[in-house]
Each structure stands twice: as C-alpha cells, then as structure tokens.
Amino acid sequence: MKILSPCVLRALERFNAAYPWDHNARYHRWILRQLPQRFRRAADIGSGSGDLARLLARRADSVTAVDVDPVITAQAQKLTPASLPVTFTVADAVADSPEGSYDVITCVAAVHHLPFAQVLTTFRSHMAPGGTLVIVGLSRAQTPVDHVLGVLAIPANAAMGWLKNKGRPSPRPTSMTAPTRAADMTFADIVRETGTLLPGARLRRRLFWRYTLVWHQP
C-alpha cells in the first residue's frame, strides 16, 4: 500500500537524516513504569549503546546487557560508570542466551532480528517466578490500522526530530548506528504466536512503527 510518492519519501528521508532522534529511547520511561521499583536480576537483550541497561541498573542488583555487535557493546561499556552493576556481553540472544533466571527481561527493537517463537521460548525459560518481560518491537504493516498509524507517525516523526535537535542538524545518536533490517512479521502474526507461547501477554500497536508486549511469569 503506497501512500506517499517516492519524491516525498526521499525528502522525508533527507529531513530525518538531518534531524535524527532515537525512537526506541522514547519508550524507555514507559518500560520502567511496567517494572517493580526494585528487582534483583535483569537482562536487556539487544542492549545496543546501553541506555536502557543503565536505567535498569538504578533499580536492579545486577543487569546483564546482551548484544551481538562487539563494536557498539564496547562503546556501551565505555559510556557506563563503573558504579553501575551492568555486565556487557557479546552474544547471540538465542544460541548463547545468558544463564540463570531473571526478574526482568527487556528487549527493544531486536526481536525482529531473531526467530520469534524461539526467542520468546528462551525468554520464558529464563524468567523467574513473578518476573516481567517487556518487549518493544517492530512489525510489518498490513492492515488499514497499521497504515493509518504509519501515516500519522510521519509528521509526528519529523516534528519530534526538529524539536529534539532544537532545529539544528545533528549527527545520528550512537544508539541508532547499529545495523537494522525490516520486520517480516505482521502484528496479527505476533499476536497469534505470543498467545500460544505467553498466555496472558498484553500487546498494543504503538506510534512510530512500534508495538509493545508485556508478560508476567506466573
């Protein structure tokens, strides 16, 4: 479904490149509101530049931050004060998943890089009783609702970029420099598979081409 002409899309891409902002960081405060004020162990999967891991570390006894990219993981380590209880690990979230159980597992804009059913099963197996899983993910637009949300996000995205950069062109944040790929699962696919693997999970479409998933281990 094509809504904007290629000429308009190219103009928007140039604008967004000049005034970038981190869509994922917008959800960090929302993620924290889904979690207890204090918890023992947390894992942040696809931790990137470590922004969310550092926020979790202010509430946790320990945080394991996992990312497959060694370059951005090294940058995250440098940005993290030694006083924060964060351990950065270069690993595949499925093949080399962190050992033990966690009270909190978060994953932002990384699940679409992984085999969905397998990664949800892995998260479930590492969740402590009463623990919380929070995912912010990307889905492939398919329905009219998806496309309407996408259209609404376009001017909002440009406005946010302008405001966050105070009207001045800016380099891309470190957290936005990691390789990305398009999502291949629709929101309906995600809801169906999640219902089988994580009964009771709450899923919602969100603005800026995202959805959220919250699940509590019984």
Image: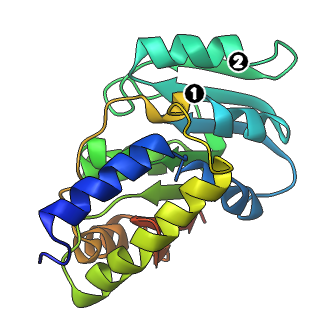
Secondary element under disc 2, as helix, strand or loop, is: helix
Q: Residues within 10 Å of mark 1 (few under 14, many from 20)?
A: many
Report x, y in % for residue 199. 43, 74
Q: Report if residue 32 is visible in the image.
A: yes
Report x, y in % for residue 172. 50, 33
- Residue depicted at x 45% and y 12%: 71
Camera-nearest residue between 103 and 17: 17
Secondary element under disc 1, as helix, strand or loop, is: loop
Q: Mark 1 points at which residue?
A: 49
- Give the vertical position of 87 relative to 171 (above or below): above
C-alpha distance separating marks 1 and 2: 8 Å
Type of amino acid at the residue the image marks with label 2: Leu
Q: Horizontally, is 111 left or right of 28 in the view?
A: left
Camera-nearest residue between 65 and 153: 153
Report x, y in % for residue 142. 18, 77
Q: Report if residue 132 is visible in the image.
A: no
Camera-nearest residue between 144 and 131: 144
| Scheme of image coloration | rainbow
- Residue depicted at x 74% and y 56%: 32
- Residue depicted at x 63% and y 41%: 102
- Give the vertical position of 213 relative to 58 (above or below): below
Type of amino acid at the residue the image marks with label 1: Ser
Q: Earlier in the sequence, mark 1 or mark 2?
A: 1
Q: Mark 2 points at which residue?
A: 79
The numbered dot on residue 38 is none
- Give the vertical position of 97 relative to 141 (above or below): above
- Residue depicted at x 81% and y 57%: 36
Q: Residues within 10 Å of mark 2 (few under 14, many from 20)?
A: few
The C terminus is located in which quarter?
bottom right
Q: Horizontally, is 115 left or right of 120 in the view?
A: left
The reply to whether the C-beta atoms of the residues labelled 1 and 2 are less than 8 Å apart is yes
The N terminus is located in which quarter?
bottom left
